[in-house]
Amino acid sequence: MDIQSLFVDLVDKAKEISGSLARSEIKGKHPVRVRFYTLLMDYLNGPGSPAAGDFFMWYIERLDERKRMSPQWMQAIYKVTKKENESGFRNFLIDCHNRFQSNPDFTEAIKPWIPDDEFRILSSSTSSDITGVIKIAIQICQEKDEVEKQIKGAIFAALPTFMIGLLMHYVIFNFVYSSAVTPGFMDVKTWSELTLVEKNYAAYTWIMENWLLCGVGLIGVFMFFKWSVKNWHNKLVFIREHYFDYLPPYSLAKTNEQYNTLLILSSFMRSGKSFNESLLEVSDGACKYVKMQVAKILNNDTEQASVALNIFYLGTFGSDIRDRSKYMPLENAIETLLPRMQKEKNEKFQRIVNLSMLLTLKPLIIGSLVFSIVPVLMSLMSNLPDV
């Protein structure tokens, strides 16, 4: 391979990485997708019979008009920086437009830019009018944004306690432990010969010397939980259902996936697909754990679809659907249950997030402080003269 070919390959690889990062950014920014869905729905509800695939170029033209009508100082900035107005959103629209030109399928055109659950909702419509599923996608985005705010709010609420804990550990190490140990004690004693104060001092020193390793370890634990929530071995499903699903973060994921599973199932059934076909659509693009639960429903030996949904994973919602479907079609029974599920989901999320912070971060900080102070107090008391 010559130098020129190598350089071209590197440039192409850099473009791929840049494109992937841009798509990940859109996927992670819920307000941006809400804006896109809202603009799209307004466009489709406009005069005439506009097609969804024409929206991309139509809005790019609107952005061009705004650029031409922008103040002179702003146009000067665009000229100097050689950037377009709303460049991130514009690149998203251009990529979707190009994909649509290659394959005139609107949902496939935006697929790389949106999360899987939103894509499945949008692709559930068999009608040319997709405003109904767009409303559902907007609702999902808004709920995700609300959950994110709840989690950030709980973290910021615990931040003062965390900072006070770090400050106290700093004071304890620099002003208490440093004067309570003899310099160089690690060179003349084995670990078994060390006092509890000396062991804690050694632990403090190791953490400060290896702070990067500790940070990587914490990130690794976080990534493991994030991975294990979605991926689970089929032989351990019983343990997951009866134990792990009641503990965060698994309980948060279960609450969310219960709602999304029934929401997507209802949407596909209302579009005209059969119960089994809709379940296969739910499974397509879902995480491994949800796929296993869908397989349970499909393998449920019953002729009644409403009874097949009555599995342990869905909890009381499965039996509620069974009871409601006696008086209405199954898709309507699910649809009437969704508002209650949504309310319970939001309340449960708030409760679990707050409880998680209360039972993890604060006890960890307080416990570490107690573990640091008690050995010092015990050492002082042991050195007091007998009266």
Image (tube, rainbow, N blue to C red):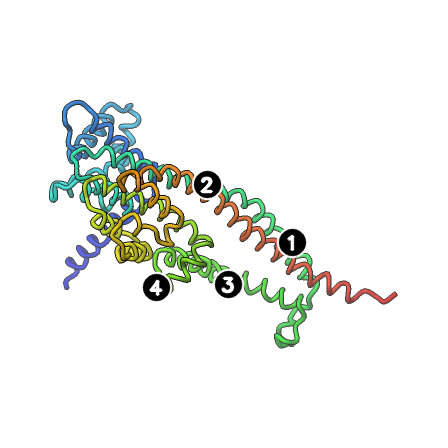
Numbered disc 1: secondary structure:
helix
Residue 216, position in %: x, y?
44, 60
Seen in the image, is 75 located left or right of residue 358?
left
- Answer whether labels 2 and 3 touch (C-beta < 8 Å): no
Which of the pair 230/20 is nearer the observer? 230
Seen in the image, is 181 located left or right of residue 74?
right
Which of the pair 29/343 is nearer the observer? 343
Q: Which residue is mark 1?
A: 171
Q: Which residue is mark 2?
A: 347
* Marking on residue 210: 3
Q: CA distance from mark 3 to mark 1?
A: 20 Å
* Marking on residue 233: 4
Dot 2 or dot 3: first in sequence order is 3
Whether 307 is drawn above or below 377: the answer is: above
Residue 356, position in %: x, y?
51, 50
Q: CA distance from mark 2 to mark 3?
A: 40 Å
- Answer whether labels 3 and 1 touch (C-beta < 8 Å): no
Numbered disc 4: secondary structure:
loop
Residue 98, quarter of the rendered image: top left
Callout 2 amino acid: Glu
Dot 4 or dot 3: first in sequence order is 3
Q: CA distance from mark 4 to mark 1?
A: 46 Å
Dot 1 or dot 2: first in sequence order is 1
